[in-house]
């Protein structure tokens, strides 16, 4: 009886339940990162992986199409992970950005952001074309996803891309984030990533904030603020360029 009442309360307050569930998942992920990997794999990467596994299980168990949100108890996850909260988070991040910080990064930091966005976009677009995509909207969305897993869905939504293409863009961004997170400590000695100036440039080139922050934390925690500074602006620049200038550029070739 108590369990039935608890289930009913949690189901009736689905969004609150979703926040509690995600918070618990993130806490567990950071605990696993600290205890099992000694911080070499960032907690956010583990949380992303666990989220994907749970989404797969939810779809498999219910035969639905929205992952864990198909289960009544976790219906709020669909709202929490929807476009409204995603776009709200992006806007909140943009309002929290400090232009003075970007100025302190200097001309090289600003240029690295633009180069990083365009380079990632081009690589993602080439991969999309090599897999048979010829629609400019699809190529642009996947290319934007290669920049970050936030820029991809924002671009896809703005251009009217299909849900399958948007999902691919998210997968591309997540793959990049995890690779940057894991690979940074190994490449840091080879590229001279041992000072704030190098961290500023690295954050601008890579762009994935969670990947850069996690990778620099495993390399040298003192470098995290510098890399995260330019990586944060990278997302905003990507959201501006991908559905506009870069999309028009893709249409010239396709």
Image (cartoon, rainbow, N blue to C red):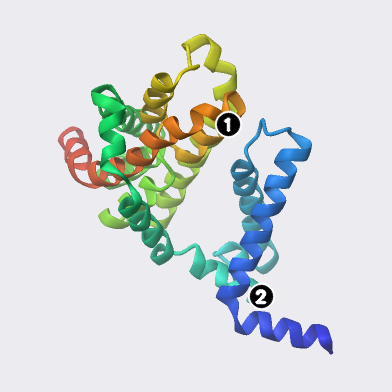
Task: Report the residue at 59% width, 67% height from top.
Answer: 19
- The disc placed on residue 217 is 1
For the N terminus, give its image quadrant. bottom right
- Which residue is identified by label 2? 73
Number of marks present in the image shown = 2
Residue 9 in percent (x, y) is at 68, 85
Viewer-side residue, 42 vs 241: 42
Measured in 3D between alpha carbons, the distance from the residue under mark 2 to the one under mark 1, in whole angstroms, is 36 Å
Residue 120 in percent (x, y) is at 36, 30
Image-quadrant location for residue 247: top left
Residue density around tag 1, few if under 14, some if 14–19, many if 20 or more, within 10 Å? many
Viewer-side residue, 145 vs 16: 16
Task: Report the residue at 68% width, 34% height from top.
Answer: 39
Helix, strand or loop status at disc 2: helix
Residue 179, compared with residue 142, is above or below; it is: above
Residue 254 in percent (x, y) is at 21, 36
């Amino acid at each position: 009886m108590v369990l039935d009442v608890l289930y009913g309360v949690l189901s009736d307050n689905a969004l609150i339940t979703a926040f509690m569930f995600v918070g618990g998942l993130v806490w567990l992920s950071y605990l696993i990162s600290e205890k099992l990997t000694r911080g070499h794999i960032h907690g956010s990467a583990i949380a992303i992986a666990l989220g994907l596994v749970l989404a797969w299980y939810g779809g498999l168990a219910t035969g639905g199409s929205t992952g864990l949100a198909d289960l009544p108890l976790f219906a709020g996850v669909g709202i929490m992970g929807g476009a409204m909260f995603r776009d709200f988070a992006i806007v909140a991040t943009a309002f929290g950005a400090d232009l003075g910080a970007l100025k302190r990064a200097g001309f090289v930091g600003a240029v690295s952001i633009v180069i990083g966005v365009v380079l990632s976009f081009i690589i993602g677009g080439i991969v999309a074309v090599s897999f048979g995509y010829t629609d400019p909207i699809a190529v642009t969305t996947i290319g934007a996803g290669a920049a970050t897993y936030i820029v991809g869905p924002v671009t896809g939504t703005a251009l009217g891309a299909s849900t399958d293409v948007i999902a691919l863009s998210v997968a591309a961004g997540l793959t990049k984030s995890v690779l940057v997170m894991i690979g940074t400590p190994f490449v840091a000695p080879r590229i001279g990533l041992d000072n704030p100036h190098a961290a500023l440039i690295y954050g601008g080139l890579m762009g994935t904030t969670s990947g850069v922050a996690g990778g620099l934390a495993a390399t040298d925690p003192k470098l995290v603020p510098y890399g995260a500074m330019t990586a944060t602006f990278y997302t905003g620049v990507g959201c501006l360029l991908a559905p506009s200038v870069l999309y028009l550029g893709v249409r010239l070739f396709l």
